[in-house]
Every structure is written in structure tokens, then in C-alpha cells.
Image (cartoon, rainbow, N blue to C red):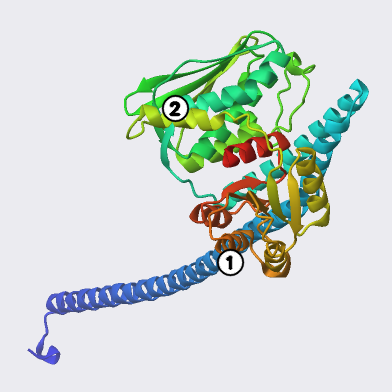
Amino acid sequence: MPLRDINDLEKLKKINAALVSRVERSMDQQGNAFSLFQTAISLENRVRTRTEELHSTLRRLEQSNIDLSAAKENAELANLSKTRFLAAASHDVLQPLNAAHLSVSALAEVQTSDEGRKLVRQVERSLETMEDLLRTLLDISKLDAGVVQAETGDVSLEALFSSLRSDFQPVAELKGLSLKFRPVNAVVRSDRTLLRRILQNILSNALGYTRSGGVLVGTRHRGDTIRIDVADTGCGIPEDQREAVFEEFHRGTSSANAELDGGGLGLGLAIVRRMASALGHPVTFSSKVGRGTIFHIDVPVGIGAPADAIANSADMERPRGYGLFGTKVLLIENDVEVLQAMTFLLERWQCLVRAATSTDDALDMLGDTDWVPDIVIADQHLDGGDLGTATIAEVRDYLGRAVPALIVTADSSEAVAKAARAGGIELMRKPLKPAQLRALLAHLLA
């Protein structure tokens, strides 16, 4: 109905009210839609902002990972460089140290007075301390760089204990201490050299921090492992030093050890922890201040325990008492000081020495058909890039027989050890212990 045809005022009011209500509802709906539109725009902006922030964070994280990776690579390279430097420095320092060892040993044999022998012994102790420090620093460097590879095999504990007893019994007797090893007929799965070094360092510490009583070494079977215990009656380790004892250059501060002789460098247990970690042998200890300490090393049980192998290993530990009188020695060494010292020492042992500095020199020495060496002693790194192992092989080919041979080197790399083993050549590290050299020569010539 058209509005002009409506005459009723009330009807007009009702229609007007309905129209106003409809307009208001429409405006409210439009307002809500606009509000929703504004909210959507705001949310979109916030999502865009958060997305940009997330991308920025991811880029920073990616850059941080790149920086960390580069830093890790640089650290590893620096660590390997440190190892190479220490190896080279140790080789250079061990050469004159070896010459000094040999010269002092020869000097000791010509001393007739007690005062002279006492001074010689003091020099020997100083040289041994220098050698221990150099070798320990090199060992720590190699272990930290992860370049030490364990050669796992069956190790006879009886033979190992026999060797350690021979080394440490004189030390214990000198200090008036008892040193006991409980008999054990067992084989463990480990690297013999590293395991021996672990026990050697623990024993050295035990004797060093014990003033009365002694040290006892024993074993206990614990399922598929054997626990080696080293117990002492020393000053003990305070509670607040239980972790610090494994740190480099840490020495006990207890008054009980303040007057102990020897002193030590505080590197023994640092080496123990690193070697034990490399082998996977847990090392723990229990201690009471004033009463002593017990170190525990858990080692896997070996595959077999042949009694004859144990006996043979024990026999090999004992040097044979054969003389060297008249032994013909072909000595190949390019360091003049070492060559002179070694020649003098061998001649003091009544050996007949011919010296060479390279492969060609050595072969020239063999031109005299009346002189055939009984044994060849060679350094590994010779003049002209010659290698001692290769030189020995050429000497043997020239002579037509496998003459006994010994490589004496300051190179502690596994490559040299493998080359010596492959050629059936004995190996000794510089600096030499003259008594060990003489025992080995006697054994090779027996």
C-alpha cells in the first residue's frame, strides 16, 4: 500500500518504527562486518610481522650454526696442530735427551768415587723427570685429539702384575713400604700398553702419597668384568678434591703429603682418566682421609687364559744375563751426538761397533767380507730421507740372512711400530734406558 493512501497516524508510526528498526539492524550488521574486517587486517599484519620475525630468527640461527661449525672445525684443527707441534717438539727434544741418557750411563761406568756416582744418579733422575714430562704432555695431547687408537686383545694380568712388581718393588723398598700383588690367573680384554700405563700411574700415586704401610693390588670377578683394585694406606683424598684429582697439574694439598719426596707433576690421574675413557674402562675410587684410598678399574673378561702364554710373557719380562763381549754391531744413526754416545756406550760393553748415517753408508760398511754384524741398531729417520726399517731390510738382503735388528727412535707414531712389526724388528723409544737396551740386546743375541 502506498504511503500517501495511509491516513491512520498509528499505522504510520508503526511503519516508521519498523523501518527505523530495520535500518538500525542493517547498520549494526555493517558495523560488525567492518569490525571483523578491521580485526582480520590486524591479524594479518600480526601474522606477517611474526612470520618475518621467525624468518629473521631462523636466519640468525642458521648463521650461528655456521659460525659454530666453523669454530668447531678451527678448534679441531688447532688441536691437531697442537698435537703435531708437540710430537715434533718432543722428537727434537728427545734426541739430545737420548744422547744425554747414553752419555750419563757411560759416565756412570767409569766413576770410581761415591761422590761421582751420586752426582751421576742425580743427573739421571733429572733426565728421567724431563722425559716423563715430555711423554706425558704428548700422551695428553694425543688423547685429547682422539688420535690414540686402542689395540684390544687378551692381556694376562699375572704377566702384567709381574712386570709392574719388577718396576715398583725397588721404589717401595726405598721408602720402606710394602708392595703386594695378589696372584691372579686371569685374562682381560684390553690394550696392554694403555692398561699398564693406567696401573703404572695409579701405583706411582699410591706409593708417592703413602708414608707408612704399603700398597696392595688385587682383583675381583664381577660378572663379565674383572675389577682391579689398587689400595694404599696413604693420606687419602678429601671430599672437596674428588673431581679435582683428575685435573692436569693437580696435586694433593693435604698436610700428610707435604713432606713427601719426589713431588710429581700432577698429571698421572689426568692421563688415567683419558686412557680409561679411550678404553671404555670405568675408573672409580673410595677414600678416607688419613686412612687411604682404593682405586677400582673395571675391565672386560678376556676370551681365553692359556697358562703357557702367561709363563712365556713372564719369561720375556725378565732380562737374560748373557754378555755382549765381542758382539759386532752395525749402528746406523744420523744424529752426531747420539751416534757418539751410543758408540761409546756399546764399546764400554765390549762390543765392536761400525757406525753409519744412511743406507748407502751402512751397505758400504758391509763391503768388508771379514766383518759381518751380529745385530743392527738403526734410527728410523736417517739422512737423505732413508728409513731405518727399509735400511735394515736392505742390509738383510745384502747379507742373505735375517740378522737380529732393533729400531731406536723418538717417533712414537703407530706407523713406525707397524713397520717394525711387519719387518720382524724390535722397537725401542728414545730416550733409551741403557739397562733395558743391554737386556734386549742380550735377549736378541741369545
Identify the element where label 1 is drawn.
Answer: helix
In the displayed structure, 243 sits above or below 8; it is above
Q: The C terminus lies in which quarter of the figure?
A: top right
Query: Residue 287: image x %, image y %?
Result: 57, 16
Quarter of image, res 13: bottom left
The label on residue 106 is: none
Q: Nearer the viewer, residue 27 or 94?
A: 94
Q: Which residue is the site of mark 1? A: 70
Label 1–label 2 contact, CB within 8 A = no
User: What residue type is disc 2 on?
Assistant: Ala
In the displayed structure, 311 sits above or below 289; it is below
What residue occupies the far left of the structure in this picture? 1
Quarter of image, res 366: bottom right
**Which residue is at 83% across, 28% downward?**
121
Q: Is residue 347 left or right of residue 437?
A: right
Query: Residue 302: image x %, image y %?
Result: 36, 33
Q: Which residue is the site of mark 2? A: 311
Q: For the residue carrying disc 1, how many other residues have a C-alpha within 10 Å: few (<14), some (14-19), or many (20+)?
A: few
| C-alpha span from label 1 to label 2 | 54 Å
**Which residue is at 51% across, 29% downward?**
315
**Which residue is at 62% across, 37% downward?**
442
**Which residue is at 63% across, 45% downward?**
428
Query: Residue 392: image x %, image y %?
Result: 60, 59
In the displayed structure, 396 sits above or below 289; it is below
Q: Nearer the viewer, residue 178 or 229?
A: 178
Tell me, yes or no, if residue 209 can be seen here.
Answer: no
Q: Nearer the viewer, residue 252 or 349?
A: 349
Quarter of image, res 43: bottom left
Query: Residue 353: image x %, image y %?
Result: 75, 50
